[in-house]
Every structure is written in structure tokens, then in C-alpha cells.
Amino acid sequence: MALDDKLDGMKDQATGKVKEVSGKVSGDTKTEVEGKAEGLVGKAKGAFGDAKDAAADMVDDVKEKFNK
């Protein structure tokens, strides 16, 4: 479900930001980089959810046109 992808993406973005800031504050470069990577994964999951929504909308539009 697209909503699940979006929510999972937002969770990953938030977790990634926390790790990134934590790493930056503590001087732990590895944690900072892991946080940035997790944030990017979150953005990708959100974009995937958006793409699934758009595809579902297009399918619905096509079905509507054929049912007329």
C-alpha cells in the first residue's frame, strides 16, 4: 500500500536525521553518514509511495473511460 511506503519513508527520514545530528554533535562521522544514508532511503520510499499512488490513479482513470 502506498500509504505504508510513505509512512515508512517518513520514519526513516526522521530516524536518519536523528542519527545524522547525533553523529555530528558527537563527532562520530560513521553515525553521521549512516544517518544521511537512512534519510535518503526514507526519501526514496516516500517517492516510491507517490509513484504507486500516481499509477493507481492512472489505472482508475483508464477503467473509468472503458466503463463509459
Image (spheres, rainbow, N blue to C red):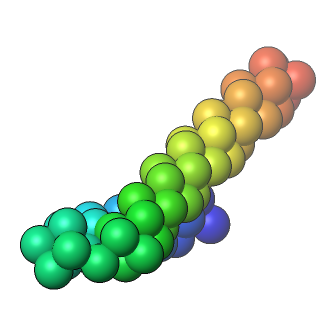
Can residue 60 be spotted in the picture?
no
Residue 51 appears in which quarter of the rendering? top right
Q: Quadrant of the N terminus?
A: bottom right
| Residue 29, position as x, y percentages in the image | 35, 70
Depth check, front residue: 68 or 34: 34
Residue at screen point 42% across, 75% down: 30
- Compared to residue 65, the image places residue 23 above or below, namely below
| Residue 59, position as x, y percentages in the image | 78, 35
Can residue 63 be spotted in the picture?
yes
Q: Is residue 21 left or right of residue 47?
A: left
Q: In the rendered picture of this protein, how many numbered marks are placed on residues?
A: 0
- Compared to residue 43, the image places residue 7 above or below, namely below
| Residue 35, position as x, y percentages in the image | 38, 69
Depth check, front residue: 10 or 22: 22
| Residue 28, position as x, y percentages in the image | 29, 78
- Compared to residue 15, the image places residue 37 above or below, namely above
Q: Quadrant of the C terminus?
A: top right
